[in-house]
Image: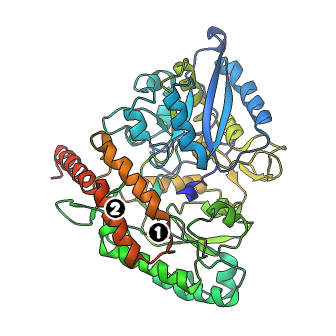
Amino acid sequence: MLLALFVSACSSKADSPSASGESDAPSSGSSGSAAAPSAELPPVKLTYYFPQGELQKDYASVEEAVNQYIQPKLNATVKFMPVVFGDYEQKLNTIVSSGENFDIGWTSNWMFNYESNAEKGAFQDLGELLPKYGADFMKSLPESVIEGSKTSKGKLMAIPNYQVAAKAFGFVIQKEYLEKYNFDVNSIKSFEDLEPFLEVIKKNEPDAIPYFSLGNSFSAIAHGYAGIDNTYYKKGDPDYKLIQLESVPEYMTHTQMLYDWFNKGYIPKDVATANFDETLKTGKIVSYVDWTLQPGGEANIFSHNGGHEVVFVPLTQPEFSGVQPTMTFISRTSKNPERAMMFLNLMNTDSKLFNLMAYGIEGKHYDKVGANTIKLKPEGGYAPDVGWAMGNVIIGYLKEGQPEDTWQKTIELNNTAFVPDIFGFSFDPSGVKTEIANLDAVFKEYDDAVKSGSVDPAVYLPKMVNALKKAGSEKVLQERQKQLDEWLKSKGKK
């Protein structure tokens, strides 16, 4: 999931591309805000929590530049509250539990969970705020994107950070090794097809890591299952009978393969505890899997893996995954929700503001190398590279190495990706909160070891499945099935 940390961003002076003939593509460029003139508004200070891969040295000058830009427009200033990803969920949970006053934060369906935090009242309801103070933003997006931002109860409790919204699962492989050993990527259609390449790397490159098993590399889609957000069923099943992925035979087969790779030395011995991001920076990782192979993504990875070019090798067709993996909310404790919404409206429609937030100051933190393309300065003090967590990347800069049509292809991918039958279904976990908390504890105990290939799945996977059952996995699955059946009937699909 952390490798979804790459979509970056375009220019305040250039129009971002839109899909040819696509009326539902996001609009771009500097835009007038829905806010009232600054002179009519009392001054306010906004507090904004957002995640970072690592903390930056020079937030001060960027924050100053942002405030100089927004103050005349909104009569507001914003205080940056960056938090590294590893600490973000705990930090935000503590803040929310304490009732601390703050204005804006980041949420998702995989960290600081959108649905559960909305359910417990951590967020402002944006149903009236967005149309009134975020009209420009609403107009810039397809209606389906706004609908896809709603909770299981139909409430709009956060806005999407528009980026690639389709997942294409596959390998990321260093280009130099493919060329050095004349390996044809077109021959790779499965994990098994990659093994001969890993064997060559292990034999001839003693300092390289042939494969790094990042998180869960089991693709339900690739093994004939469909679904979204842990709600999976066998493709073509007219009853949409849900399954626990860890219990299907293909899951055992996949983890056994990883364990075999681990024993052959293709996977590093410390894979279960090693920091992937730090290891990637060394440039030693030759291959790994990514869930979101996206247009222009190769250039993003180049800046994270020690400056080594990579090749994407997709194993599945793109599938629409929605917008809830990255969203921005207004806190329930905000004393200025209207002004917070004005700020978010501006950040998602004004390319100058977005680029300031995402990339900092031209000449200091990056250089322009094209009309709409920049080159980051790693030593400039501000290169967080998480624009995808801040707003609409389609209106942002391209990074050096990204093709000029990256945003157009992103829009086209979002518009043409396969949409699962149950897309739009959102699980309400309120009736099984205790079980879900217990399941999370089990996953924390077993997940990294089993999914990394560092332990024998014949021993540990049955233990994991049994522990999940004791924690309430079957009850959660039954509740999911019940809600899904009701949703399917309401849509005339069952």
Discs 1/2, front? 2
SS for callout 1: helix
What is the x, y in percent for residue 339? Answer: 57, 20
Q: What residue is shown with label 2?
A: 467
Q: Nearer the viewer, residue 265 or 295?
A: 265
Q: Residue at x 28, y 60 (%)?
A: 469
Q: Which mark is residue 59?
A: none
Mark pair 1, 2: CA separation:
16 Å
What is the x, y in percent for residue 479? Answer: 23, 49
What is the x, y in percent for residue 481? Answer: 22, 52
Q: Residue at x 65, y 56 (%)?
A: 404
| Quarter of image, res 198 | bottom right
Q: Nearer the viewer, residue 168 or 290?
A: 290
Q: What residue is shown with label 1?
A: 451
What is the x, y in percent for residue 215? Answer: 51, 64
Name the colour scheme.
rainbow
Left or right: 25 in relation to 229: right
